[in-house]
């Protein structure tokens, strides 16, 4: 049973895209790993929002299921990423991502 | 008796293997006496076996043909090759020369090479040489013959460059190897052609097949000319003679054995062995005769102008082998082999006594620094004189009988006066001149610069072979080998007395000229006019080949210094390396940079999706 959608969808896509671009831009510009992780969080949330918007548009609960899924994933990701950041700091005594370039060709 | 003959080539091979294998069992270098017993003994026993077998063949089988099949070597389609020996009187004569003279020279070497740090290596090479040479003369098929042919070439190379620490010797060795290789290539092509035409390389079968009236004469002509090419290379005849004078870089007994008595006569043996094919082709016969006549004259003139005692003997060897080729070319097969035999005696004698002179003078080889040695080393003087008399074919020496036979056949072959005979007679004169010139310069008159330090270096191991060879050089003319069974009999005809007279007179005239030449050269010392300088350089053949072949080749090599074919591979490598730098620049380890390119790529991809 489709609810009234048209403006909500466009606004939702716009919001999600803006959020994603903000996250991506932050990811590219920030050098602090912690901030980069937060930017990744923004990107994931933009994607999750997109699921919700799409679910709302088609009146399908899958979108919300995926949202929960994405949140879980984000939690797991943060857990691992923070552990990596800890290790990183432990070894390099910095959180500057540009210092982490040992694999340059 | 057959078993004995099979052991003849095997004994030197065993000697070689033992000498080479000694370091596998003993840490220390064995004393010289042990090496001498093995090295000289193996050849000595081989010589003994040969003598016994020859006597047995002589008594038992008058035709004198013995076939010994050892084992099958290979079978490829029609081509069946065996390690089989075919022994007839021609082979027996060669066997006696190789093992007999070879043994004497081995014995001499034991004295000459004493205290050389590479004594063992020397005898190992020498034994290997004897094995290869015996394989060459005993082989019943041309491929086995070719194996021996290459084997003696290898040993020649190894022994010319025996004192390898001097680069000059190494160069001489390479030159000998490369120049003879040209002839060997021609010979190999000749073998292919013979097999292509007759489907066999077994010598008796080949001779039977070629004797068939239906056989293609043109192919036979080409094949025999190609075999002549091989013979010319190995026997240092025109135009491949340039390697032999340089081959004198080796130890003197090696020059005596390989570069005078045995290996260089392999070409003569090859043509004599294949003589039924040559008789089928007048072109090939003429070519052999002309090569021989030209070589004997050119090398003779070169010998007159030399100042190194060994180079004189080297040129005289070339010249004498020219005589043998001349004999082959006029169908005097027995004469050629007879001269081969007497030449082995007197040239080995000459080289060995020259070796004694060189050793006595502490390695001085320039004849202008010698002189008056007859008082200092009378025994060597006696041996050298006998050798010279025989080389110059003074009457009653061995060389006289063999050379006389060749000249008479040359006269008969063309029914009277002809250019080949004239070349031979002129050669006899020149031989007399250069032979006695050396004899006078080295032994006669007042002492030269090097003679003052002369100390007789002969040991018993050296004097015994010299004495035996001297006797053989004097009386070898009486040992006419019974070669009629191989070559057939030729009607004895006696040309006019003056023809024989000329042949006898020529060496004596040469002796007189040599005396005059010696008187003049003793006064002037080592001086050369432009003509003698030209002769000295061996008629400029080295210069010619250097400009005609060596330099253009070197230039090409320089031009192609960066190998053209290599450019393909090098190009591939360079391209990969460029790609590598390019791509590794993108792997800069900056996570944010990766992310940016990833984002840019995604945008590009999305844009493409939208655009399409």
Image: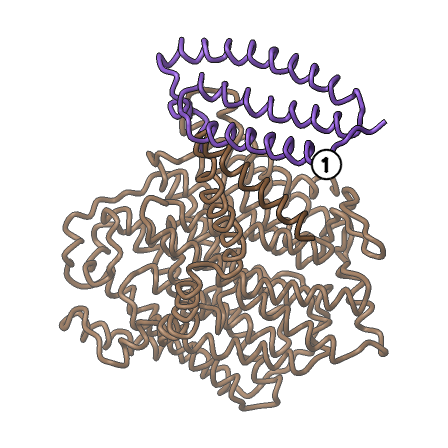
Chain colours: A purple, B brown
Q: Position of residue B553 (x, y in %)?
A: 43, 67
- Answer left or right for B252 relative to B367: right
For label 1, count other residues whose C-alpha is less than 10 Å away and answer few (under 14), some (14-19) or many (20+). few
Residue at 28% x, 69% y is: B437
The answer to whether B121 is drawn above or below residue B323 in the figure is above
Q: Position of residue B605 (x, y in %)?
A: 62, 44
Residue at 23% x, 46% y is: B362
Image-quadrant location for residue B416: bottom right
The answer to whether B297 is drawn above or below residue B586 in the figure is below
Residue at 31% x, 69% y is: B436
Quarter of the image where the C terminus of chain A is located: top left
The residue identified by callout 1 is: A6
- Answer left or right for A73 relative to B451: right
Q: Position of residue B277 (x, y in %)?
A: 72, 72
- Answer left or right for B454 relative to B219: left
Q: Considering depth in this image, is B70 or B87 the residue closer to the camera?
A: B70
Q: Secondary structure at mark 1?
A: helix
* Residue B140 in view: yes
Quarter of the image where the N terminus of chain A is located: top right
Q: Residue furthest front?
A: A4
* Residue B391 in view: no
Image-quadrant location for residue A31: top left
Q: Considering depth in this image, is B413 or B154 the residue closer to the camera?
A: B154
Q: Position of residue B21 (x, y in %)?
A: 53, 28
Chain ID, mark 1: A
The answer to whether B404 is drawn above or below residue B384 in the figure is below
């Amino acid at each position: 049973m489709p609810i009234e959608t048209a403006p909500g969808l466009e606004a939702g896509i716009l919001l999600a895209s803006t959020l994603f671009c903000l996250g991506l831009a932050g990811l590219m510009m920030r050098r602090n790993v912690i901030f980069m992780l937060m930017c990744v969080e923004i990107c994931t949330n933009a994607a999750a929002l997109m699921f919700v918007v799409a679910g709302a548009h088609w009146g399908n609960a899958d979108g919300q299921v995926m949202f929960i899924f994405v949140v879980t994933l984000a939690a797991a990701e943060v857990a691992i990423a923070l552990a990596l950041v800890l290790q990183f700091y432990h070894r390099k005594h910095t959180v500057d991502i540009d210092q982490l370039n040992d694999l340059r060709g | 008796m057959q078993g004995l003959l099979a052991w003849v080539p095997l004994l030197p091979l065993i000697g070689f293997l033992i000498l080479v294998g000694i370091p596998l069992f003993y840490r220390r270098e064995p004393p010289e006496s042990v090496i001498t017993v093995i090295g000289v003994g193996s050849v000595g026993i081989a010589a003994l076996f040969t003598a016994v077998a020859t006597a047995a063949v002589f008594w038992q089988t008058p035709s004198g043909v013995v076939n010994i099949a050892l084992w099958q070597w290979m079978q490829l389609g029609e081509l069946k090759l065996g390690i089989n020996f075919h022994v007839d009187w021609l082979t027996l004569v060669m066997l006696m020369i190789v093992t007999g003279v070879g043994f004497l020279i081995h014995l001499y070497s034991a004295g000459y090479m004493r205290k050389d740090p590479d004594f063992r290596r020397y005898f190992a090479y020498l034994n290997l040489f004897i094995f290869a040479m015996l394989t060459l003369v005993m082989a019943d098929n041309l491929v086995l013959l070719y194996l021996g042919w290459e084997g003696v070439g290898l040993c020649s190379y190894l022994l010319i460059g025996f004192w390898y620490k001097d680069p000059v010797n190494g160069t001489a060795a390479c030159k000998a190897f490369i120049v003879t290789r040209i002839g060997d290539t021609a010979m190999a092509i000749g073998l292919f052609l013979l097999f292509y035409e007759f489907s066999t390389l077994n010598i008796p079968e080949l001779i039977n097949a070629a004797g068939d009236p239906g056989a293609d004469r043109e192919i036979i002509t080409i094949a025999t000319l190609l075999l002549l090419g091989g013979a010319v290379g190995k026997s240092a005849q025109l135009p491949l003679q340039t390697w032999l004078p340089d081959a004198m870089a080796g130890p003197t007994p090696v020059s005596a054995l390989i570069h005078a008595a045995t290996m260089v006569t392999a070409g003569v043996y090859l043509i004599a062995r294949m003589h039924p094919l040559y008789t089928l082709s007048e072109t090939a016969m003429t070519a052999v005769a002309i090569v021989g006549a030209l070589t004997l004259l050119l090398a003779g003139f070169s010998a007159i102008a030399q100042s190194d005692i060994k180079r004189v003997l080297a040129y005289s060897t070339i010249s004498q082998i020219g005589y043998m080729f001349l004999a082959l070319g006029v169908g005097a097969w027995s004469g050629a082999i007879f001269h081969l035999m007497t030449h082995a005696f007197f040239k080995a004698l000459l080289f060995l006594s020259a070796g004694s002179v060189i050793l006595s003078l502490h390695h001085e080889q320039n004849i202008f620094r010698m002189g008056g040695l007859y008082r200092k080393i009378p025994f060597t003087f006696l041996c050298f004189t006998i050798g010279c008399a025989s080389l110059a074919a003074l009457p009653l020496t061995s060389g006289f009988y063999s050379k006389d036979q060749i000249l008479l056949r040359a006269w008969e072959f063309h029914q009277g006066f002809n250019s080949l005979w004239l070349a031979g007679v002129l050669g006899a004169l020149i031989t007399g001149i250069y032979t006695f010139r050396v004899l006078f310069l080295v032994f006669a008159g007042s002492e030269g610069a090097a003679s003052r330090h002369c100390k007789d270096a002969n040991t018993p191991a050296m004097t015994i072979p010299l004495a035996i060879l001297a006797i053989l050089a004097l009386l070898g003319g009486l040992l006419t080998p019974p070669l009629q069974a191989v070559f057939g009999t030729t009607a004895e005809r006696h040309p006019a007395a003056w023809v024989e007279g000329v042949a006898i007179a020529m060496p004596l005239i040469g002796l007189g000229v040599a005396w005059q030449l010696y008187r003049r050269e003793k006064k002037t010392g080592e001086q050369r006019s432009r003509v003698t300088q030209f002769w000295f350089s061996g008629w400029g053949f080295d210069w010619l080949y250097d400009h005609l072949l060596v330099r253009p080749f070197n230039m090409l090599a320089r031009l192609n210094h960066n190998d053209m074919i290599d450019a393909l591979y090098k190009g591939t490598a360079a391209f990969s390396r460029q790609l590598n730098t390019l791509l590794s620049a993108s792997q800069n380890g900056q996570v944010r940079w990766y992310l940016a390119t990833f984002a840019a790529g995604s945008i590009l991809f999305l844009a493409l999706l939208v655009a399409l």
